[in-house]
Image: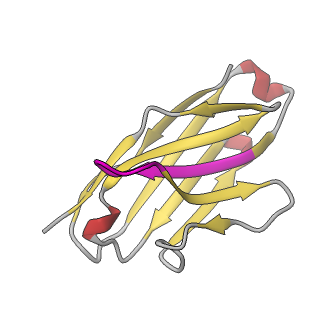
Amino acid sequence: QVQLVESGGGLVQPGGSLRLSCVASGRILNVYSFSTQSWYRQAPGKQRELVAQIRSRHKPNYGDSVKGRCTISSDNPKNTVYLEMNSLKPEDTAVYYCHVVVADHDYWGQGTQVTVSS
């Protein structure tokens, strides 16, 4: 089992920036590494969509709506994945979820709310 805890969400004005963090824990992480580390988001009334993803031995992948404005990074010794978001827009308002795949099992965090509003 892997537990994921996200943080860093909140209220930000349009054009502002936020950095989300997701810390993973679980004994399985002593044996297996992450296959993927991702951030998804879900806005009210919309489907969950991929924001950014890191896959082992691949370049980061970004959703079209955030390309050029977001950066995903990971600190594997700390089992932490980050999402840096810049030039935020009201349409970025959503619950942001951390997702990882470890040993062919996928795990979701509880989500952190990001609200972009003046």
Q: Residue at x 51, y 51 (%)?
A: 40
* Residue 59 left/right relative to 66: right
Q: Quadrant of the C terminus?
A: bottom left
Residue 38 on the magenta segment: yes
* Residue 82 left/right relative to 18: right
Q: Nearer the viewer, residue 51 or 112?
A: 51
Q: Which residues are magenta?
A: 36-48
Q: Residue at x 37, y 42 (%)?
A: 112
Tell me where residue 14 appears, x and y as whole percent. Answer: 24, 73
Q: In which quadrant of the rendered view does residue 31 lie?
A: top right
Q: Tell me if residue 101 comes above or below residue 20 in the rendering.
A: above
Q: Tell me if residue 29 comes above or below residue 7 in the rendering.
A: above
Q: Residue at x 72, y 38 (%)?
A: 101
How many marks on residues? Answer: 0
The reply to whether residue 91 is visible in this rendering is yes
* Residue 62 left/right relative to 35: left
* Residue 79 left/right relative to 52: right
The residue furthest left is 118
Q: Quadrant of the N terminus?
A: top right
Tell me where residue 13 appears, x and y as whole percent. Answer: 21, 69
Tell me where residue 111 appears, x and y as whole percent. Answer: 42, 38
Tell me where residue 64 appears, x and y as whole percent. Answer: 53, 73
Residue 100 on the magenta segment: no
